[in-house]
Image (spheres, rainbow, N blue to C red):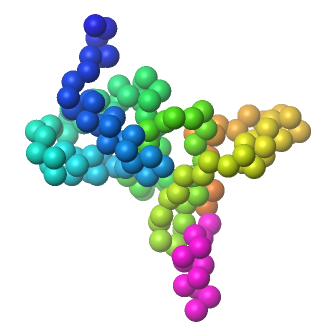
Amino acid sequence: MTRGKYKTRQRQEILRYLKSSKNIHKTVKDIQEYFQRENIDVGLTTIYRHLNALIREGLVKKYRLNNDSSAYFEYVEEESSYHCHCNSCGKTIHIDCDEITAFQEHIKVCHGFQVDSFETTFYGICCSCNEKMKK
């Protein structure tokens, strides 16, 4: 086995957890709480080590919504990952939409700019918060 690519139970559990949480962004705290619920003994350093390895392998994406937020982790199945972040409640949703892909291509062809789709987050107000504001 190649160093850094060995498969431990903790690594497999992290990957399984992130896969089962498709399009839901998880923090290290979420992962740590999952291990506690499952009675799997794993330290915080081990979680970070495995997450970093999964990021290097391209299986997991790490991002921050702003400089003050915790890092979020997401299992990567596709080449692009767009998100919408609500400025009111803080909810973040994953977007998988052909229209956004077409927009990205338009930006590239017409404006000569390659969008980094893994770092693209749209900010605004979610439907729930919008409804609350109307009342």
Residue 13 at x, y percent in the picture = 26, 36
Kindly identify the residue that appears in the image at 23 percent across and 49 percent down. 34
Q: Is residue 128 magenta?
A: yes
Residue range corresponding to the magenta coloring: 124-135
The residue sitting at 48% across, 64% down in the picture is 91
- Please, which residue is most extreme toward the bottom here? 135
Q: Residue at x 21, y 24 (%)?
A: 8
Q: Is residue 80 above or below residue 11?
A: below
Does residue 15 sit above or below 89 in this rendering?
Answer: above
Residue 124, percent across and down?
Answer: 62, 66
Q: Nearer the viewer, residue 18 or 50?
A: 18
Taking the spot 52% from the left edge, 73% from the top edge, the residue there is: 88
Say whether residue 64 is visible: no
Which quadrant would residue 11 be assigned to in this image? Answer: top left
Q: Residue furthest front?
A: 20
Any part of residue 134 in sight: yes
